Image (tube, rainbow, N blue to C red):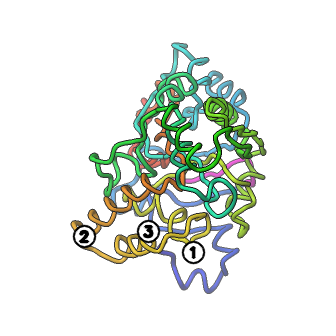
Amino acid sequence: MIVPPKYIKEKGDQGFAEHPVGTGPYTFEQWQRDSQITLKANPDYWGGKPAVEQLAFKIMPDPSSSLAALQSGEVDIVTGLTPDAAQQLGDAPGFKVVTSPGVRTFFVSLDTEEGPLRDKRVRQALNHALDVDTLIKSVLNGAAERTPTLIPRQAFGFDPAIQPYQHDLAKAKSLLAEAGHPDGFAVKLSSSTADKDIAQAISGQLAQIGVTAEVSLLDPATFKGRLVSDNRKALGEMYFVGNSGWTMDASSNLQSFVRHDRRQSRWNNPKADELIDKEEQSVDPEERQTAFTELQRMLIEESPFLYLYQASILYAVSDEVQWKTNANGTLAMANAKLATS
C-alpha cells in the first residue's frame, strides 16, 4: 500500500497503525480495540465529500447480537451473514437481505509432501469424491457458485474453458486403488468453528470412498494464527479455508498458496513457480492470461487443493440506507446515502 513516508518516520509503524492517515473518502477518528472503529467524511477527498458524515464499524462476533442490533435500529448494515442467519431474518420490515456475487473462493489445502496426499492420484480421487453442487445447495442454501480452481469467475485470468472435477465416486475409488489405498485411509481436516457445517459435510462425502477425514475445529483466532504462522503443517494434512482477491486479478488469489516459497504453499512444483513468476512480472495481458490458463490446467491435473466454490456476499441493510457492496466485499462507503441526506 502507498503510505506517507514522512508521517511514518515521525510516528513509527506502531503510531501509524494506531492513527492511520490516507487519501480515501473517510479519515480516521477513533479506534476501540475489538469494539469499534469510527471514521468521518473527508472534505478534501478527490471524489467529493461523502454524503454520510460519520461511519462507525462495530465488531460483533456473535451473529445473534448483530442481528438484534439491526432489528433494534442500533446498526444500519450487517455484513458477513451466513445463509442460516439470512433465512432467520426473513422478510421482517425495515430492512432487506441482499445476496450479491462475491469473489471469495473456498477450498481445502492439502499437504502434498507427506503421507497419502503426496500422490496426485489420491488428490484427484478426493476431488472426484466431492459433490460440490450438493454442498452449495444443502449447506449454503445456494449462496455460492462453483469454481474449477482457486480463481473466481470475475477475476482477470479466469479461463472459462477450464472445467471443474466431475463428481464420480467410481473414478475416485479406482484412483485410490491405483495409488495403493483400496480401503481408503484416515486423515485430519482442520477448520474454523465458523465453517463447521461445511467441513463436516466435506468429511461425510469423503467417507463415501473410504477416506475418514476427522474434523478438527478451532476457534477463528486460533485457526487464523496457525494459518499465517511459519509452520505450514500447523493445521495438519488438510484444512478448509477461504481466500479473497480484492484486486480482481487472479494473482491475488494465487499469491500466497501456489509458489513453493510462499507462506501458505504446500506444493513444490518448479513449473508452477515459473508460471507464477510470469503472471506476476509481466504487464502484457495476453502473456499473463496464457500463464494463468496453464496454471489452471496444472491445478486441475496436480490437484494440490480440493476445489469448491466462490461464496456469495450476504448482508442486511436498513431501508434508511442506500448502499450496495462490491464484488470483492470491501466496505466501500463513499457512495452510501441516508434516506434523509
Q: x, y percentage for residue 76?
A: 56, 32
CB contact under 8 Å: marks 2 and 1: no
Q: Mark 1 or mark 2, which is nearer the start of the sequence?
A: 1
Name the image quarter holding residue 204.
top right
Residue hosting label 3: 272
Q: Is residue 159 above or below residue 255?
A: above
- Label 2, secondary structure: give it: helix
Pointer 2 residue: 287
Disc 2 residue type (three-letter): Glu
Instruction: Tell me if mark 3 has few (under 14), some (14-19) or many (20+) residues whose alpha carbon lies within 10 angstroms of its own.
Output: many
Question: Which of the marked residues, 3 or 2, is nearer the chain's N terminus?
Answer: 3
Amino acid at circle 3: Ala
Left or right? Give the position of 148 relative to 208.
Answer: left
Asked if residue 57 shows in the view, the reply is yes
| Overall secondary structure of the magenta section | strand
Is residue 37 a member of the stretch shown in magenta?
yes
Q: Residues within 10 Å of mark 1 (few under 14, many from 20)?
A: few
Question: Residue at the location (46% across, 51% down)?
Answer: 150
Q: Residue 89, how many percent across, how many down?
A: 58, 18
98 above or below 298?
above
Residue closest to the eye, 178 or 313: 178
Residue at left 60%, top 81%?
8
Mark 3 and mark 1 lie on one chain; the one further toward the N terminus is: 1
Q: Secondary structure at mark 1?
A: loop
Q: Which residue is mark 1?
A: 261
How many marks are shown on the rendered structure?
3
Could you tell me which residue is drawn at 75 percent across and 55 percent down?
33
Magenta range is 32-40
Answer few, some or many: residues within 10 Å of disc 2's Cα (few below 14, many 20 plus, some between 14 and 19).
few
Question: Is residue 258 within the magenta segment?
Answer: no
Position in image of residue 144 (x %, y %): 46, 33
Identify which residue, 76 or 45, lies in the foreground: 76
